[in-house]
Image (tube, grey):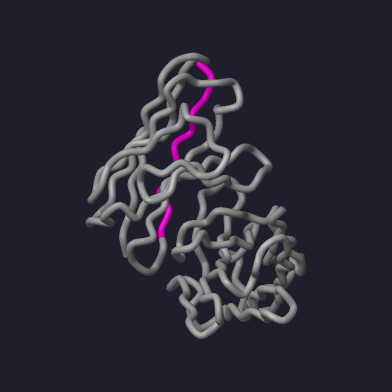
């Protein structure tokens, strides 16, 4: 059974940093691209960042470019999102998402971790 | 950036009725479009990928069609558990984008 377990969310002040982790199990982690998708309270879904299976390629939404960094450790079956210079607009539930074969089709989602940016 | 526009924003229907949801892309995405269902307090679930392929475990009452810029998700006969928010999403171009969602509510 595929499982994606996010951690690292919490309350942070504007301008602060946070690192999210996602522990993956139930599939060959190193064979699949992964992404982070977020959802602000009461709002729709927004793709944030993606990383290829090997980690050699990454892609970011313009809204987080230069502030967030996606990475992975295939030896630990873990996906990360380093978030710097956080803003109130970054407040959201962050989902760890597995891609189905072709990158960009999200076939498994974690339950999400809430990040709140507030003073 | 490819903008996905979903309509209607809200669809009020009764169980057993047919639901037709639309997603229009600002430029062609070929068949690289998926549909997701989200219930309150839950993570989204993949329903349809590449415009018309049902994901694993998805009932046959869900079907997707379209290509290029116009796509449709059809629920042939609404079950009580189908009342939720539905999102389309394109994977044709970076950045990946989602539509704003259609809420299917009980009439």
Quick check: is B102 in the magenta stretch?
A: yes
Query: In the image, residue B41 lies at what x, y percent?
Result: 68, 42
Q: Residue at image x 50%, y 44%? A: B55
Give how far across and how far down residue A80 sits, in percent. 66, 75
Residue at position x 76%, y 66% in the image:
A7
Front residue of B31/B86: it is B31
Q: Quadrant of residue A61?
A: bottom left
Screen quadrant of the N terminus of chain B: bottom left
| Residue B61 placement, left or right of A22 | left
Q: Is residue A18 left or right of residue A52?
A: right
Residue A2 falls in image quadrant = bottom right
In this rendering, does residue A11 appear at all? no
Judging depth in this view, the residue of B31 and A84 nearest the camera is B31
Q: Is residue B24 above or below residue A109?
A: above
Q: Position of residue A28 (x, y in %)?
A: 65, 68
Range drawn in magenta:
B97-107
Overall secondary structure of the magenta section: strand
The image quadrant of residue A97 is bottom right
Residue for point 52% across, 56% down: A106
Q: Is residue B24 magenta?
A: no
Q: Count the labels in the image.
A: 0
In the depicted structure, whether residue A86 falls above or below residue B84: below
**B16 horizontally vs B6: left or right:** right
Q: Residue at x 70, y 71 (%)?
A: A20
Q: Position of residue A59 (x, y in %)?
A: 46, 76
Q: Residue A34: tell me if it is visible.
A: yes
């Amino acid at each position: 059974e595929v499982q994606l377990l996010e951690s690292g969310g919490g309350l942070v002040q504007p301008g602060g940093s946070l690192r999210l982790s996602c522990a993956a199990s139930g599939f060959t982690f190193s064979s699949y691209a992964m992404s982070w998708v977020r959802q602000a309270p009461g709002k729709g879904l927004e793709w944030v960042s993606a990383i290829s299976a090997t980690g050699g390629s990454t892609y970011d939404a313009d809204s987080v470019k230069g502030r967030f960094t996606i990475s992975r450790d295939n030896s630990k079956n873990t996906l990360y999102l380093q978030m710097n210079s956080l803003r109130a607009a970054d407040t959201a539930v962050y989902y760890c998402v597995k891609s189905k074969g072709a990158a960009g089709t999200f076939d498994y989602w974690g339950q999400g971790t809430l990040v709140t940016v507030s003073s | 950036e490819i903008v996905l526009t979903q309509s209607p924003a809200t669809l009020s229907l009764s169980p057993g009725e047919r639901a037709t949801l639309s997603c229009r892309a600002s430029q062609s995405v070929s068949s690289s479009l998926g549909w997701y269902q989200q219930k309150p307090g839950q993570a989204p679930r993949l329903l349809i990928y590449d415009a018309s392929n049902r994901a694993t475990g998805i009932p046959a009452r869900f079907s997707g069609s379209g290509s290029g810029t116009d796509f449709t998700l059809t629920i042939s006969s609404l079950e009580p558990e189908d009342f939720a928010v539905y999102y389309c999403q394109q994977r044709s171009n970076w950045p990946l984008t989602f539509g704003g969602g259609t809420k299917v509510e009980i009439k």
